[in-house]
Image (cartoon, rainbow, N blue to C red):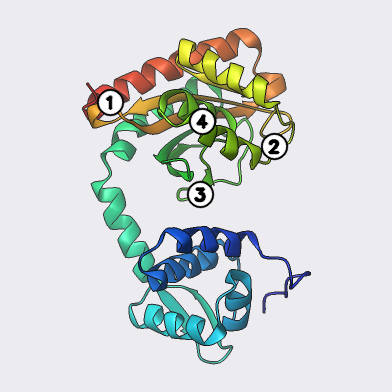
Amino acid sequence: MAAKPKNSNAKSAHAVALDTALERSTVPAVSRAAAILRLLGRSSEQVGVQFIARSLNIVPSTCLHILRTLVAEEFVSFDPVTKLYSLNAGVLTLARQWLGQNRFSDIVQPALDRITRDYGVTAIGVQVVGLEHMIVVAMARSETMIQLHTQIGSRFPATISASGRCIAAFGEYDRDELRRRFKGLRWANAPSLSEWEAQVAETRVNGYAIDQGNYMAGVTVAAAPVFGVGGQLAHCLVVVGISEQLQDQTLARIGRDLRESAAKVSRQLGSA
C-alpha cells in the first residue's frame, strides 16, 4: 500500500497539474481520468482509491466512479483481493497504435543511433506540446556514459534545459509568458533570467542549444529544433552526457551534428 503524503494540507504536484488542466477543460471528468492514468503510470506499485483521490485532490466517490469506468474500458486493472489499482494493457494498445502512426519516431531513430554510437552519449527525440511539456518519443542509450532514469513516454517541463532554450528560441511564444514559465522551473544550478534570455538568443543564432550543468549538476545537455509541416516547431533532438567527458570542441561538434541531423529530419517530415 502506498504511503500517505507527509503533509495532507499541501497539494501534490499531481493535484496542481490537475487543477491547471481543469481550469481549461470543458469536460472535467476526462481531465480527471487522464490525471488518474498519469498518476498510475508514475506509480511503481499498485495504489488504492484513497491514495489516488488524496494525491489528485478528487472527491473519493468521484474518483471511484472514474476508476470503475477505466477498469471497464481495460485501461486500469483492479485487484479484488488487495483493492488496489494499476495500469492495464489497454493503455499499451493505445501506445502501440500511436507509435505505429508516429512518423517522427521512425525517421529519427537512425540519427539517434548514429549519434550515440559516434559520441558515446544518450540521444533522445522529444515531442513538443506547446509550453506545457515535452514527451520522450524516441531514444538511443549509451552503454559507456550516463544512464538516465528516462524512458519512452517520460514528460519534462517544456522550457527546461537545452531543449527548453530551443522551444523559447524557435517556438514564437510571447516573451512575458516565457518569463513567467521560467520562474517556475527547477534547476540544479539555475541561470538568471538575463543569462537564460541571452542563451536563448544564442540558440537562435547557432541553431542549437547547450546546457552545461544548469538542469542537472555535472550533466551537459545539447538540443536542436525539428520543424514539422508549415515550419512549426514540433520536436527536438537532444543529447545528454557527463560534462567532464564532453570538452568544448567535442560539444561544438555535437551541436553542429544535432543541427544538421535535425534539419534533415525536418525535411523528411515535410517542413518547408
* Earlier residue among tags 2 and 4: 4
Give the residue displayed 31% in from the left and 25% down from the top: 265
**Residue 46 shows in this picture:** no
Give the residue at the far top of this rendering. 249
Q: CA distance from mark 2 to mark 1?
A: 30 Å
Report, in whole angstroms, how far the alpha carbon at label 2 lies from the one at label 3.
Answer: 18 Å
Residue 231 is labelled as: 1
Q: Earlier in the sequence, mark 2 or mark 1?
A: 2
Q: Residues within 10 Å of mark 3 (few under 14, many from 20)?
A: some
Secondary structure state at the residue bearing disc 4: helix
Q: Nearer the viewer, mark 1 or mark 3?
A: 1
Q: Position of residue 39 (x, y in %)?
A: 54, 65
Q: Is residue 193 left or right of residue 91?
A: right
Return the residue at label 3: 154
User: What kind of element bears circle 3?
Assistant: loop
Which amino acid type is shown beneath numbered disc 4?
Ser
Which amino acid, by three-letter code, is at mark 1? Answer: Gly
Q: Does residue 18 lie above or below 246 as drawn?
A: below
In the rendered view, tell whether residue 263 sits above or below residue 52: above
Is residue 214 visible in the rendered image? The answer is yes
Residue position for label 4:
163
Residue at image point 68% right, 41% down? 186
Compared across the picture, whether 219 is left or right of 202 comes to right
- Image quarter where the C terminus lies is top left
The reply to whether discs 4 and 1 touch (Cβ–Cβ < 8 Å) is no
| Residue assigned mark 2 | 187
Helix, strand, or loop for circle 2? loop
Q: Residue 228 appears at what percent x and percent y?
A: 28, 31
Q: Amino acid at mark 3?
A: Ser
Residue 233: x, y in percent? 36, 30
Give the distance between the C-alpha atoms of the residues marked 3 and 4, in whole angstroms.
Answer: 14 Å
